[in-house]
Image: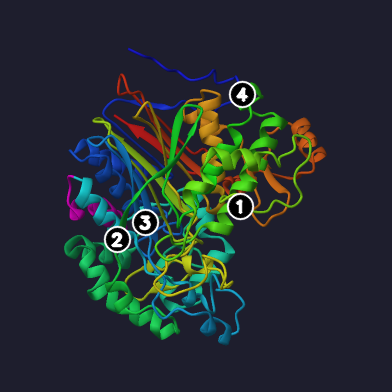
Amino acid sequence: MSCFFGASLMSYFHSRRSAVIARNGSVATSQPLAAQAGLQMLRDGGNAIDAAVTTAAVLNVVEPMSTGIGGDMFALIWDKGARKVVALNGSGRQAAAANLDDVRKAGFDSIPNNHEGSHFAVSVPGTVHGWETALNQYGRMTLREVLQPAIDYALNGYAVSEVIAHNWGSEDTVSKLNHRPSGRQLLPGSAANGAPQYGEIITLPELGHTLQMIAEGGSEVFYKGEIARKTAAFIQSEGGWLTAEDLANHHSDWDEAISVNYRGVDVWECPPNGQGIAALIALNLAEGYDIGAMGAQSADRYHYLIESMRRGYADAFQYVADPRVAEVPIEPLLSKDYANRRRAGISGVQADPNVSYGDPMGAADTVYLTAVDGEGTACSLINSLFAGFGTGLVVPELGMALQNRGSLFSFDPNHPNYLEGNKRPFQTIIPAMATRDDEMWLSFGVMGGFMQPQGHLQVASNMIDYAMDSQEALDAPRFKVEVEGSQDILVEEDLSPDVIKDLEKRGHTVNVVSGYDRARLGGGQVISRDAETGVLTAGSEPRKDGAAVGW
């Protein structure tokens, strides 16, 4: 029998809380109500996949600015029987009629994220089909059963938590929803602007009734029935491309998960069109340094991980696209030889002022959740609208905000992520897993736009290089590399002033964040599993309203 307590809480920083330990099942996510709903599904006989979809659906109601049925989803599932990680791509494609000329004729140089022109950013929402696909393949419960807790909260009400009230009441969010009358469906609060207050009890009846329709009619009603007709008619009235035919043609895809081995641990991501490959590239680079011998909060560790991450992003932005439409060199990008060549350009004393993509061939608001059941099946799932409330376009009578993923397409005709119809855009949302000796060890993720691969890199390093437990790995201070090609990084106020000075000496432009701004460094959840005892160790993000629960 093995026993693992992680590193001393005082070894690297002051960790604020202990991990949750359980044997029969665990759920971790950014909202306690959602985590508890998922755990109850496990108690009622469901497995990890049932719990994950239950949790995701409740998050649509209690954290609606971040996720919803109008968005996309991805999942990694540990198939215990096959002893392998499988990937589910539940993201939607751009409308068949999409084209660059329409955008430019409307006076835009890029696809707008909100207000005027946001209808161009609407791609087919993939979430509902993704949920149903996961349940049909691996779940035990029906779609009706797993959606019921979300329906109950939407129709009967819930009290709004602190961080959610803050995010919901932001000027940008309220302005986006108020731009059209239907947006008021998602402004149910008592404040003059419609935003709910901390502790206020609210309902979302239109959304609740839409979820009821899905519970009764499945994905068929969403993509080919009443919901599809209303969604397409609304977008067409706005001048957008999305049609009923686009919705009817949607399907999810099962993919081969991709991985690299980092110091004996296989770290897994969904393949492109998502950005998970950036985290794997960075891990390959970081493996060439003795990270564990450096202080966990040392300037050396920060520097090498930052420089590795910047190269991971440079490559992802150059090569990631829909692999069913464009060629994406996945294997070359993840090879150790390529990592060795890229690593040669990293200086230990100077930040690179101009990180460009390499040649592997040679010469955005989201929710994340994880669930692991007592039998060892695991689901790492991420759901998102991209920006807060997506486009801000809320379908009349349905209470459903539509995502703005289409804004991530490139306007460069030579880029693999060029705007085209029936093509999936570059995706920021990525779940992760790690296996050790062919056993599921970690089911984890860090939501937050372009923070996500960086969070994966840092959490994986915390647990592999420093033997931190699930909660310590999330409590640890983090950095964020700005992705515009600059040398700017964000760090948290916990970081030593001496370390900040050292990083600045090496050429990094360091910006310190505190308070609510710490949310810019993402929101993570981790569940680890001891292969010998089956004991689950769960941690949840301290920068959110998160909760890890177990039994």
- Badge 2 marks a residue whose secondary structure is helix
Give coordinates of residue 303: x percent, y percent.
70, 37
Direction from residue 451 to residue 49 in the image, left or right: left
- Badge 1 marks a residue whose secondary structure is loop
Could you classify mark 1 by the number of other residues whose Cα lies within 10 Å: few (under 14), some (14-19), or many (20 or more)? some
Name the residue beneath numbered marker 4: 12
Amino acid under disc 4 = Tyr
Give coordinates of residue 312: x percent, y percent.
59, 47
Name the residue beneath numbered marker 2: 128
Question: Residue at point 49% right, 39% down?
Answer: 541
Specify whether residue 459 is painted magenta. Answer: no
**Mark 1 vs 4, N-terminal side:** 4
Question: Residue at point 73% right, 49% down?
Answer: 487
Amino acid under disc 3 = Asn
Residue 331 - label: none
Name the residue beneath numbered marker 3: 60
Name the residue beneath numbered marker 1: 359
The stretch of residues the image draws in magenta is 140-154
